[in-house]
Amino acid sequence: MSSSQSVTTIKHKEFKEDPERTETARSAPTNTRARGRGGPPNRPRPVPILRYDVAADPAGHAPRRSTVTPAVFARHRRMIQRARRHFMTVTEYCSALRSADAPPDAIVVTFDGDRAETFVAARELAERGHAATVFVTTSRLGAPGMLSEADIRRLHELGVEIGASGHSGRRLDGMHRSDVTAEITLSRRRLAAITGEEPRSFAYPRGGWDPPARQLVIAAGYSAACAVGEALSHPGDDPFALTRLTVGGGLTDHRVRAWLDGIGRTLPRTFLSGSRLRLVQPGLGVRVPTRVSGVYHPLFAPRAPRATQVPPVDRPGHPQR
């Protein structure tokens, strides 16, 4: 054997007998792109928190953009069941967020509407063993075509989480603190009288909230709160301003399936710094939109306080007013 062949043989044996180098070679990825619907297995999928408002459509006309008919919801329910996600209530999901133990395939189905059709839709989920959360505007209970106290009591007995959504249904952002407190506490007390338990979750009416309203919800004893946001939730979501996706009548089944697969946008991750909310980049590899509506208005990004006035610049030819 020649000297060059001997050296080659020795190097080959050293490589085979070195376990670290062998393991490195085996673990080297051949393709860095994520495979499958959910991406890498060690990364949790974004969680769809769906927001439904079910309304009957006896005249056969198309429902309003923010509502779905019972037939559409029944079709969506079958799609959600086929997705094999883990159904959770709002309170259960927030508890999992705090413990960093949220299932990677969770889904949360919520109902904001107070119509009688909500009872049928939520009951369909409960009878199949699926968790759901119904948010109630207490001043509308018992009105014609709306949920009744008996409906709320029955849903509670079936295991559906009953949450509050204020008393009158008015947006809370911009309201006086005393009015916000009244909206929060009145709905909480009435639902406690109906079900025998104080509600633990809250939904900001029509998604309207601000930091003072958020703090008053926490002070009232709630353990979770839902906003809107129109984006997928993720492990960095704020338990007192969960972002949800509105499922309207004009939404295509293709979009719903994408949400169930964890495909869609997410909003910046939130955390508290002193008494203010700050936003940071999410770590799920999903692009953050340049413009964010609803609860994540730029008002909550790091900036000067509201009362701070920035003096105008006196430029030549443009005197100050």
Image: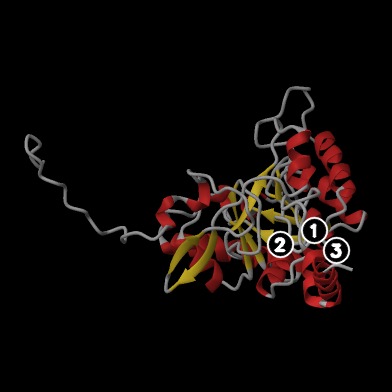
Q: Secondary structure at mark 2?
A: helix
- The amino acid marked with disc number 2 is Val
Q: Secondary structure at mark 1?
A: loop
- The amino acid marked with disc number 1 is Asp
Dot 1 crowding, Cα within 10 Å, few <14, some 14–19, many 20+: some
Label placed on residue 105: 1
Residue 202 image position (x, y, % from top left): 63, 61
- The amino acid marked with disc number 3 is Glu
Label placed on residue 90: 2
Q: Are marks 3 and 2 in contact (CB under 8 Å)?
A: no
**Mark nearer the N terminus (3 vs 1):** 1
**Mark nearer the N terminus (2 vs 1):** 2
Residue 43 visible (yes or no) = yes
Q: Which of the 4 image quadrants contains residue 184?
A: bottom right
Q: Which of the 4 image quadrants contains residue 130?
A: bottom right
Between tags 3 and 2, which lies in front?
2
